[in-house]
Amino acid sequence: MRSTGHRPLPHQVRPGPASLRDLAAEKGWPPLIPIPAIGYQLGADRAALEAYERAVVREKPTGFRRFTTGTVGPRAAAHQNDKWNEHIVTQPNSIKSTLDLIAGS
């Protein structure tokens, strides 16, 4: 393979498990999930899949809350007349609300 001299930026490189998850979804394969005792498993049983899904759904609202308060809020305060503010403030709050509803069920 010939090098183009271009090196990918850190945000352009996908870690192995993330790339495999994307490939599995693209190919219609069973999901790849982390299982603490054994590493990653392709096609885990229903209980393991549900436990992983619940853990992710509990974790995501915290990430959105941090993003909203640490990044979006200060930016919106500094640029109050920016049309982007309405969109960027609404989207994370909408996603967080949906995840909160799912986590509560």
Image: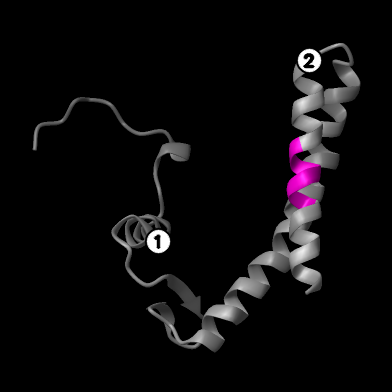
Badge number at residue 83: 2
Q: Is residue 20 above or below residue 93?
A: below
Magenta highlight range: 91-96
Given this view, does label 1 or label 2 mark the residue nearer the observer? 2
Q: Determine the main secondary structure of the stretch shown in magenta.
A: helix
Q: Are marks 1 and 2 in contact (CB under 8 Å)?
A: no
Please name the residue shown 88% across and 18% down the image.
Answer: 78
Left or right side of 104 for 59: left
Q: Quadrant of residue 74?
A: top right
User: Can you give x and y, in whole percent of width and height, for residue 6 in the image?
Assistant: 28, 26
Q: Quadrant of the C terminus?
A: bottom right
Q: Is residue 104 magenta?
A: no
Please name the residue shown 77% across and 52% down the image.
Answer: 96
Please name the residue shown 80% across and 61% down the image.
Answer: 100
Q: Looking at the image, which is closer to me, 16 or 55?
A: 55
- Type of the residue with mark 2: Lys
User: Which element carries disc 2, helix, strand or loop?
Assistant: helix
- Type of the residue with mark 1: Arg
User: Which element carries disc 1, helix, strand or loop?
Assistant: helix
**Residue at the outermost left position:** 1
Q: Is residue 93 magenta?
A: yes
Label 1 environment density (alpha carbons within 10 Å; few <14, some 14–19, many ≥20)? some
Q: Quadrant of residue 28?
A: bottom left
Q: Is residue 47 above or below residue 104?
A: below
Q: Looking at the image, which is closer to me, 57 or 16?
A: 57
| Residue 36, visible in the rendered structure | no
User: Can you give x and y, in whole percent of width and height, for residue 77 in the image?
Assistant: 91, 23
Please name the residue shown 42% across and 70% down the image.
Answer: 31
Left or right side of 16 for 67: right
Q: Is residue 93 above or below residue 41?
A: above
